[in-house]
Amino acid sequence: MEVTYQIGGPETVYRGLDGDEFHSRSHWDGSALVFDTVEHEGGRRIPETTVWTLSEDRNSIHVKRQSAKYGKDSFVTYVRQP
């Protein structure tokens, strides 16, 4: 699945692989890229915020996701390979 966002632009609406509809907006908050998404699932609206930050050495990206669906935060780090 491929989704295209316009940072600071209009809302992006798409269907997930499970058929749920997603409404997302993205914007810069300082040096962090923020995605605010609402999943429409079976009549429920489930908010999620994902924040991408680049490490000081510019060799990794940290992704923090806060989702009401799972009730907890998740953290992932992607490290640049040589």
Image (cartoon, rainbow, N blue to C red):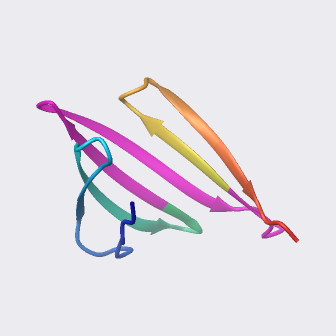
User: Extreme right residue here?
Assistant: 82
Residue 54 is covered by the magenta coloring: yes
Q: Position of residue 62 (x, y in %)?
A: 67, 53
User: Extreme top residue here?
Assistant: 71
Name the residue: 66% across, 45% down: 76
User: Extreme left residue here?
Assistant: 43
Q: Quadrant of the C terminus?
A: bottom right
Q: Position of residue 60 (x, y in %)?
A: 76, 61
Q: Position of residue 67 (x, y in %)?
A: 42, 35
Name the residue: 37% across, 42% down: 48
Number of marks drawn: 0
Q: Give the prevailing secondary structure in the magenta stretch.
A: strand
- Side (left or right) of 2 relative to 73: left
Residue 15 is covered by the magenta coloring: no
Numbered range of the magenta stretch: 34-61
Q: Position of residue 16 (x, y in %)?
A: 30, 49
